[in-house]
Image: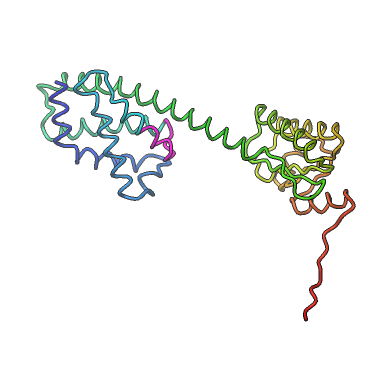
Amino acid sequence: MNKELSENIKHYIDDIITSWQEKMKKEKGERFFQYMPNDVVEKTSREFAELMTSNLLVADDVNETKLTEFTEKVVRFGWSIKFVNKSIENFSEVTFEILESEGVINDSNLRNYVKTIMAWISPLRDSIIEAYSVEWERTVQLQKVALQELSASLIPVFDKVSVMPLVGTIDTERAKLIMENLLEGVVKQRAEVVLLDITGVPVVDTMVAHHIIQAADAVRLVGAKCMLVGIRPEIAQTIVALGIELNDFTTTSTLRRGMQQALKLTNRKVVEVETEWM
């Protein structure tokens, strides 16, 4: 029966893929099939169809190479695990509907076909979801490491003045890295004023504020002053609503204003120089 199902799917594969694509376009929040180039959609659809039929002739044996390549691709495309699961469900439904409409599935063999399709889809779904989860976790970890490397560096901008731009969500692990880089950088650069720029931090809650206050306290312990810059209006409202006290260090709405304050603290200022024309 598996061989018969495989041959029938292969025979009607173009119709199956077309119907499957149309069904996927109707899914809530779908973007891939609506906005990606047609050649990318078609290629990905063919790869998905090949993956879906890879275990039909060899029971419970999914082609690992195709599985890895496909999961890597759809993670990059932003498919959610819910969308992947729906893709599998829709493919099996479309396959059944087309084979039934073409008379391949009828009253005489309905029970056998239903049993075969269920035995085909269940282990395949488990394999794809598991591979997707592993790939998604790996991608998230790589992105997290990259974000940490890019957003936790202390940058000297003037003598005695340094800036640390923070980007993304700050959790306990990132806060520890920020603290280490901050203290090491202050000592190494002999900074007197440090600006923590939170322009790229999407949310400042009690935990994030606590980490920032800890960083500011640590900076003061090594003899430097810490300033918090890049406070957007919505962040300011959140800080007030949560009752978070930031009175111990200077705050400004923009990095530019913070830099002006930092220069004043180091007895300097930026002046325009008039150019003398010959």
Q: Is residue 77 magenta?
A: yes
Would residue 192 appear left or right of 120 to someone viewing this image?
right
Give the main secondary structure of the magenta stretch: helix
**On screen, 193 above or below 277?**
above
Image quadrant for the N terminus?
A: top left
Seen as rendered, the residue at the extreme bottom is 278
Q: Give the quadrant of the C terminus.
A: bottom right
Question: In x, y percent, where is residue 8?
Answer: 14, 31
Residue 262: percent from left, percent from top:
83, 49
Asked which quadrant contains residue 73, the reply is top left
Q: Residue at x 38, y 44 (%)?
A: 32
Q: Nearer the viewer, residue 124 or 94?
A: 124
The answer to whether residue 82 is above or below residue 28 is above
Give the magenta-colored segment's residue range: 70-81
**Depth check: 24 or 174 in front?**
174
Q: Residue furthest right?
A: 267
Query: x%, y% of residue 24?
Result: 33, 40
